[in-house]
Image (tube, rainbow, N blue to C red):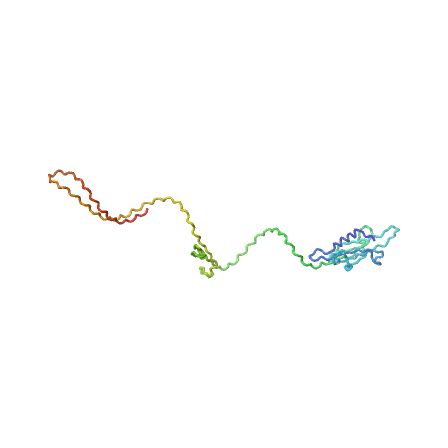
Amino acid sequence: MNIKPFALALLSVLLSACGGGASTQAAPAIVKVSIQNGAPFPTCMNGGITLNAGADINNDQILQSSEITSTQYVCNGLDGAQASGISSASALISLVKESAGSHCPAGGNVLSIGLDLNDNGKLDSNEVTSSHYICDGSNGYAGNAGPTGSPGQVGTAGVSGSNGAAGSAGAIGPDGFSALIDIHVEPASVHCQYGGAIVASGIDSNANHLLDVAEITSTKYICNGATGASGAAGTAGTAGATGATGATGATGATGAAGTAGATGAAGATGGTGTAGATGTAGATGTAGATGATGATGATGAAGATG
């Protein structure tokens, strides 16, 4: 029997790729084909080869006898008349992908066998003597989820969307309670060494506009700092302009009159002469001693300040 080399190569490639399509479920077992020289008599009168096919269930890449689900025989042609120079026809195998359908629900391959009667190296449709469908198994159940992969890189930020339309205003809520602040002087104490102020705040929960003790939620002390050292004396300012003269004060009371001085001695009396011409006035006698100074009168009222 003569099997074309290209036919066996095609058979090997296609069968090794036979299987279910991409799926999240477990992949089906690979279909394997074993080729054995020899075929039983009288199935093949002139010998041939045996093709066994089945799924490699244990995935050992070998088709075990327990895995064989199909057997086909390719028989040698009967010897021709050697004297006439006519050789026997070569056996060909064709393996073509079979889409999912009535023959193979999950798809698979169709194996065609025949003799190359016209010796063109191709298995024509009229040369096919038998066909067999090698079907893919259905997808198995999904396996357990694998471990979570590491996080991918953060993608670039998308373009910001436009702002949505403003929502309608909600209903006005009831008036809230007013917050109150109360500030009092804080004398020097453990809170403020130099004194200061105490600021109490809270909510006027009873609406009496007074911060009651029970309403105080926060108390803060604002303390005075220690008295700083005296600063240097500042430069004297320029003299101010002279003010206008004030009004004259009222005249004080007249002081008491001093005592009269002693009378001087009388001059000698002259003889009575004829009345002469009136002489010149005699010299004024010396002044008597000055009398003691009288008591000072009361000070008059001060005049208006200029």
Residue projecting furthest to the right: 83
Vertical side of 208 occupied by 225: above or below: above
Q: Is residue 258 left or right of residue 39?
A: left
* Image x and y of residue 237, in percent: 38, 45
* Image x and y of residue 271, in percent: 11, 40
Residue projecting furthest to the top: 277
Q: How many marks?
A: 0
* Image x and y of residue 56, in percent: 75, 57
Quadrant assignment, res 74? bottom right
* Image x and y of residue 73, in percent: 81, 57
Front one among 124 and 240: 240
Q: Is residue 159 left or right of residue 209?
A: right
Quadrant assignment, res 113? bottom right
Front one among 120 and 244: 244
